[in-house]
Image (cartoon, grey):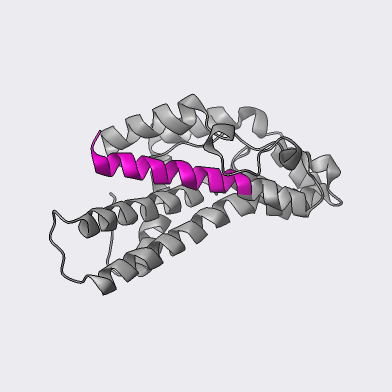
Amino acid sequence: MTPLAFLVIILFVFSVIIHEVSHGLAALYFGDDTAYLKGRLSLDPIKHIDPVWTILIPVVMYMTSGIAFGGAKPVPVNPHRFKNPRKNMMWVAAAGPASNIALAIIFALGFHLSVYLAPMVNQESLTFFMQKALVQIIIINLFLAFFNLIPIPPLDGGRIVTGLLPYDLALKYQRLEQFGMMILIGLIATGATSLVIIPVEILAEPLLGFPIKLR
């Protein structure tokens, strides 16, 4: 593994941990302290790492496609402890993708600061190395945000849709969750999830200041 790949994987793990902690913090705000009591509001990676989804899959994907993708162990959330379970769960779900967009903006600020401080850098320099890593982790965070916003339960987008629908329709929509992973695998196999790249490219351009083509 190259030093660049190693750094990007480290930043990726940090990003998925922030994603899950954001779910837990939102749940705590709405009255559910389950994640807090289980110690899942910590940034300690040991508490969040899943050997397959946080390490193996991201490493394999990054080495084969240049995009690190995966996730951390989901934080436990008990919606029955919310005052308005359906609406509150919608905001808890939205907190994850929102955190990734916020991280993309923060990393973009770091990227532009480095460019401002060192506009002309040697491609062998540490500054250029960090800039490459920042560009990649910005794209990865945008991809994490928009992939999770796919409106299929149990993804965050599915829970957001459930919170927006009228009660009767929401109950019917929730039943999709038992088939959610099969639907998602089918979409990935057919390449339909590649549509996520479109909003990633659209948002990456103003953040970076230049267009990104991922297709």
Which residue is rendered at x = 65% and y = 38% of the image? 75
Image vertical order of residue 191 relative to residue 114, above or below = above
Q: Nearer the viewer, residue 133 or 186?
A: 133
Q: Is residue 16 magenta?
A: yes
When the figure is inspected, residue 188 is found, relative to residue 26, above or below; the finding is above
Direction from residue 154 to residue 207 in the image, left or right: left
Q: In the rendered view, does 54 fall on the left or right side of 25?
A: left
Q: Which residues, given as a range, are shown in magenta?
A: 1-21
Q: Residue at x 16, y 64 (%)?
A: 121
**Residue at the image point whose x is 29% and y is 51% from the top:** 214
Residue 155, horizontal then vertical, whole percent = 59, 41
| Image location (x, y in percent) of residue 130 | 28, 55
User: In x, y percent, where is residue 129?
Assistant: 23, 53
Q: Is residue 107 above or below residue 41?
A: below
Residue 129 in view (yes/no): yes
Q: Position of residue 165 (x, y in %)?
A: 73, 52
